[in-house]
Image (cartoon, rainbow, N blue to C red):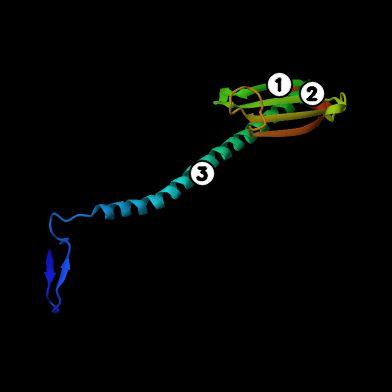
């Protein structure tokens, strides 16, 4: 114990903080830990949510890039051969086996085309999160649609 008589009053402290054996009480340590935890928990939650949203944005960007790429590929096929059909697959060769696609080329009136004059191309890219090779309603997807008119110059350029 320490006392101080400088001003005629006697003050008594429970311990002298300058002594080599001084330390924090358990209560002080617990309170400090609680204050730190109350600041860290929300900060970690924000980080976790940010990473989750980052994954969603990355997936949607992949769907966009691969969808446009596949649409342009299908336009080239239509311009060169005027072939109808449906193609499905994934982008495993690019390291994205969970991103899958379905591309349809049709000149049928029911699809919005005109036989031998106007081809409708529809490409859907989706994230196959459960790896069952089927587009489920809960999986992210993007659909692109365009029309290509039959032109002799397309076939001529494709042949050269």
Marks 2/1 in contact by CB < 8 Å: the verdict is no
| Residue 122, quarter of the rendered image | top right
Residue 88 placement, left or right of 51: right
Residue 46 appears at what percent x and percent y? 48, 47
| Residue at which label 3 appears | 49
In the depicted view, which residue is nearer to us: 137 or 21?
21
The image shows residue 80 at horizontal and vertical percentages of 76, 23
State which mark lies toward you, 2 or 1: 1
Vertical side of 134 occupied by 33: above or below: below
- What's the mark number on residue 155? 2
Q: Indicate the quadrant containing the N terminus: top left, top right, bottom left or bottom right.
A: bottom left
Q: Earlier in the sequence, mark 2 or mark 3?
A: 3
> Mark 2 or mark 1: which comes first in sequence?
1
Q: Pointers 1 and 3 in contact (CB under 8 A)?
A: no
- Which disc is residue 87 wearing? 1
Give the CA distance from mark 2 to mark 1: 21 Å
Residue at point 64%, 33% (across, down): 138
x and y, in percent, of residue 114 in the image: 87, 27
- Callout in the foreground (2, 3): 3
The kind of secondary structure element at disc 2 is helix
Total of numbered circles in the picture? 3
Q: Quadrant of the C terminus?
A: top right
Q: Is residue 121 visible?
A: yes
User: Measured from the top left, where is residue 77 in percent x and y?
Assistant: 74, 23
Question: Between marks 1 and 3, how big is the CA–CA gap?
Answer: 36 Å
Please name whichever residue, 17 or 133, is drawn nearer the observer in this view of the structure.
Answer: 17
* Residue at 54% from the left image edge and 38% from the top image edge: 55
């Amino acid at each position: 114990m320490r006392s101080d008589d400088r001003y005629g009053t006697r003050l008594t402290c429970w311990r002298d903080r300058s002594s080599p054996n001084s330390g924090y009480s358990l209560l002080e340590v617990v309170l400090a830990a609680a204050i730190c935890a109350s600041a860290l928990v929300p900060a970690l939650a924000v980080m976790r949510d940010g990473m989750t949203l980052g994954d969603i944005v990355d997936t949607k960007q992949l769907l966009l890039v691969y969808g446009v790429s596949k649409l342009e590929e299908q336009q080239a096929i239509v311009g060169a051969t005027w072939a109808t059909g449906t193609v499905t697959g994934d982008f495993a060769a690019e390291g994205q086996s969970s991103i899958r696609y379905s591309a349809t080329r049709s000149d049928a009136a029911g699809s919005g085309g005109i036989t031998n004059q106007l081809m409708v191309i529809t490409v859907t890219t989706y994230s196959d999160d459960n790896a069952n090779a089927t587009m489920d309603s809960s999986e992210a997807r993007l659909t692109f649609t365009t029309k290509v008119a039959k032109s002799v110059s397309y076939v001529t350029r494709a042949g050269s």
